């Protein structure tokens, strides 16, 4: 006969087995879909580029060297890769601007939805998600139609006699910004709404009662309390924005290269897969560090007292 | 009117007859068209300076609506709200020198106890030193000095209540509004806070408008009470007035226990009337101010204002039940006309007659015990 201790031991073993079994799908997905490809990219970054793309299985650090330095094709000397930095800086600038812009537009939108009666909130949320139904490329082309020289805005302004020459909006950084804000806005609104919905509006009343003006209530009460939503929304917008490829290609016309276009170039015309892989990992690392700093700073006061 | 209002002495001497708040013909309608609901139906009331004024009524009677109109969270559909002679009805809440203690306390969870208390002063743009001094003073007033640096989530319900009070009192409002502030506390703590609130009102000399559905709370704490029902104020008076001289059936029924008896008016003189009860007994009853009934009327008698006797009495009946309550005993009597009547007797040592079920008794109605209702 089994003693109580033995039964307990068996139950524990079963428990452990069940745990592994139940978490298997998640583990498989993380290994196959996330870590696996990443490891391949990492591996490629240390190989030698093949003559027609692809890689030759020979170890080389040339890919990593060219991320930061340029090798002169005549005398083989190394100099600082200023072009990469410029492109990265532009991507970073546009991604930050897009994040700030989506926050500026998304915050009032989310606040508006969260303050609607409960029955109508779902309808507003539904409207926010409608653009998701359409392919990203098509949405981007829609923006193109609106802002191009013969587009709605310019035509209307000319017909109204406000301008006589169309304003060049397409193929500028402004166009990229507009496109990104349009495409990523729902990603900001949804997490913001999620935290605003939980907001106790009696606290807002308490703020007004204690002589806080609307602006002060926003700054001192609403904003600190929906901070998790602001952080989540910013991350969700910033990450795809810094790696944006379609929007800058279509609306920027490939004139002003973004980081994603630079990476794409290495895998395409550049035929330098190791450099492309090294650039990918570099941008990933920078984004990760930036996010860590951001999250730590924005949630700092909570964490210290928490 | 300047927002920062009264920065003078904490103890404002009460000026008799001076009104802090005057509500004139205020109506508040929610919804539109078919779904329209009148939460307040043409309410007028004056609240005196330095007074502990209570709005008493069941849930949905409009008492919280009236408080929110005074605070500025809602705006009246009609009428005026005067604060020291100035109409504040169109002002946003942050421009009114009144503060609120919320039922849920509504403390800011991302701030410490001290930051919560200082918030109002900070918003008024007071210098740091003044804020710190005032916060320290408030912490001392509500006996929370030791917990100043705590987060509001790290203190108990009773302590949160004190912080909410301190936060609302810190900017020295002209009127303090309290929306059922004690309802979330357990019985013992509630009793403690009732005394605490009275002490605070006395020490600060601020006019308190207190909303509650607890009649006992209202009777023990208030200088004056307004009893509300279905968006109307039915009666305003001191606790004694309201209890001893209810003018309407709702007021009599809502506050304390009451016996209702049908009566016929015989004659009226100087605020009193001679009435004949169904039993044939004739008693004298008080009339509500300016009310001149004829024919039938309802008379109310509080259980402790009547006395059960073995023989005689104004009305008679049979003892149906005797319930012992420690301090007193309730004798439930079935009257000869079929109505029930309750008599409350003090259980003073050696005093009082004891009754048994089924015993025939008489009821003596004391002078001044009976009150005639308007409805």
Image (spheres, coloured by chain):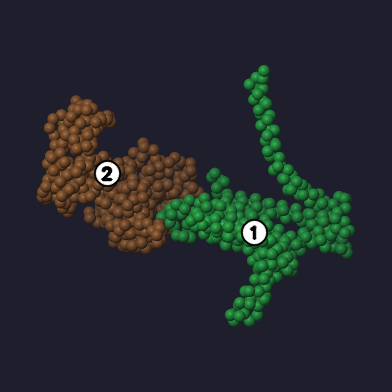
**The residue marked by circle 2 belongs to what chain?**
B
Provide the letter of the chain coloured brown: B
Image coordinates of residue B55 in percent, x first then y, are: 31, 50
Seen from the viewer's position, the closer of residues A22 and B82 is A22
Residue A111 visible: no
Q: Secondary structure at mark 1?
A: helix
Image coordinates of residue A263 in percent, x first then y, are: 77, 59
> What residue is drawn where x is 60% and y is 52%?
A297
Image coordinates of residue B44 in percent, x first then y, are: 28, 57
Seen from the viewer's position, the closer of residues B345 and A120 is A120
Do the residues under discs 2 and 1 have CB atoms within 8 angstroms?
no
Using a 10 Å C-alpha cutoff, classify the residue at mark 1 as few (fewer than 14 neighbours), some (14 to 19) or many (20 or more): few
Q: Is residue B187 above or below residue A268?
A: above
Q: Secondary structure at mark 2?
A: helix
The tag on residue A132 is: 1
Which residue is disc 2 drawn over? B253
The tag on residue B130 is: none
């Amino acid at each position: 006969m089994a003693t109580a201790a033995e039964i307990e031991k068996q139950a524990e073993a079963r428990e452990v087995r069940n745990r592994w079994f139940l978490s298997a799908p998640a583990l498989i997905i993380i290994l196959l879909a996330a870590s696996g490809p990443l490891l391949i990219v990492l591996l490629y970054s240390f190989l030698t580029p093949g003559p027609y793309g692809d890689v030759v299985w020979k170890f080389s650090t040339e890919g990593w060297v060219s991320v930061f330095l340029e090798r002169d094709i005549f005398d083989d000397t190394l100099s600082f890769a200023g072009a990469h930095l410029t492109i990265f800086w532009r991507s970073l600038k546009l991604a930050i601007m897009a994040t700030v812009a989506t926050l500026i537009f998304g915050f009032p939108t989310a606040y508006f939805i969260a303050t609607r009666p409960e029955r109508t909130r779902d309808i507003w949320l539904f409207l926010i998600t409608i653009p998701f139904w359409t392919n990203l490329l098509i949405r981007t082309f829609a923006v193109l139609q609106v802002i191009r020289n013969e587009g709605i805005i310019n035509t209307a302004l000319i017909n109204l006699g406000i301008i006589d020459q169309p304003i060049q909006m397409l193929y500028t950084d402004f166009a990229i910004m507009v496109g990104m804000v349009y495409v990523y806005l729902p990603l900001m609104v949804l997490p913001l709404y999620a935290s605003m919905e939980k907001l106790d509006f009696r606290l807002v009343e308490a703020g007004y009662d204690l002589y806080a003006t609307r602006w002060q209530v926003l700054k001192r009460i609403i904003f600190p309390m929906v901070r998790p939503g602001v952080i989540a929304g910013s991350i969700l917008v910033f990450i795809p924005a810094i790696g944006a490829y379609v929007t800058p290609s279509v609306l920027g016309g490939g004139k002003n290269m973004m980081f994603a276009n630079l990476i794409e170039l290495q895998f395409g015309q550049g035929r330098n897969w190791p450099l492309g892989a090294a650039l990918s990992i570099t941008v990933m690392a920078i984004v990760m560090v930036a996010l860590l700093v951001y999250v730590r700073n924005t949630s700092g006061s909570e964490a210290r007292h928490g | 009117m300047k927002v920062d209002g009264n920065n003078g002495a904490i103890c404002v001497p009460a000026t008799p007859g001076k009104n802090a708040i005057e509500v004139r013909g205020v109506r508040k309608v929610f919804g539109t068209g078919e779904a329209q609901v009148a939460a307040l139906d043409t309410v007028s009331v004056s609240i005196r300076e330095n007074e502990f004024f209570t709005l008493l009524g069941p849930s949905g009677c409009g008492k919280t609506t009236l408080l929110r109109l005074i605070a500025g969270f809602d705006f009246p559909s009609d009428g005026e709200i005067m604060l020291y002679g100035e109409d504040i009805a169109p002002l946003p809440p942050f421009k009114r020198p009144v503060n609120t203690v919320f039922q849920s306390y509504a403390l800011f969870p991302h701030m410490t106890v001290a930051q919560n208390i200082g918030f109002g002063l900070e918003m008024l743009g007071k210098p740091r030193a003044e804020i710190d001094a005032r916060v320290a003073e408030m912490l001392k007033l509500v006996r929370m000095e030791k917990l100043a640096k705590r987060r509001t989530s790290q203190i108990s319900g009773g302590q949160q209540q004190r912080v909410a009070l301190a936060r609302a009192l810190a900017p020295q409002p002209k009127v303090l509004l309290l929306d059922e502030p004690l309802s979330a506390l357990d019985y013992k703590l509630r009793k403690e806070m009732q005394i605490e609130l009275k002490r605070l009102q006395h020490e600060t000399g601020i006019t308190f408008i207190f909303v509650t559905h607890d009649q006992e709370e209202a009777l023990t704490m208030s200088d004056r009470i307004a009893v509300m029902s279905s968006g109307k104020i039915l009666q305003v008076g001191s606790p004694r007035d309201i209890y001893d001289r209810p003018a309407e059936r709702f007021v009599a029924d809502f506050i304390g226990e009451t016996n209702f008896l049908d009566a016929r008016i015989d004659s009226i003189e100087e605020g009193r009337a001679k009435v004949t009860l169904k039993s044939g007994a004739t008693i004298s009853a008080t009339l509500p101010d300016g009310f001149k009934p004829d024919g039938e009327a309802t008379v109310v008698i509080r259980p402790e204002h009547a006395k059960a006797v073995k023989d005689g009495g104004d009305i008679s009946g049979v003892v149906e039940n005797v319930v012992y309550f420690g301090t007193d005993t309730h004798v439930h009597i079935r009257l000869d006309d079929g109505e029930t009547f309750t008599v409350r007797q003090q259980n003073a040592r050696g005093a009082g007659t004891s009754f048994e079920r089924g015993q025939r008794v008489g009821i003596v109605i004391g002078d001044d015990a009976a009150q005639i209702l308007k409805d």
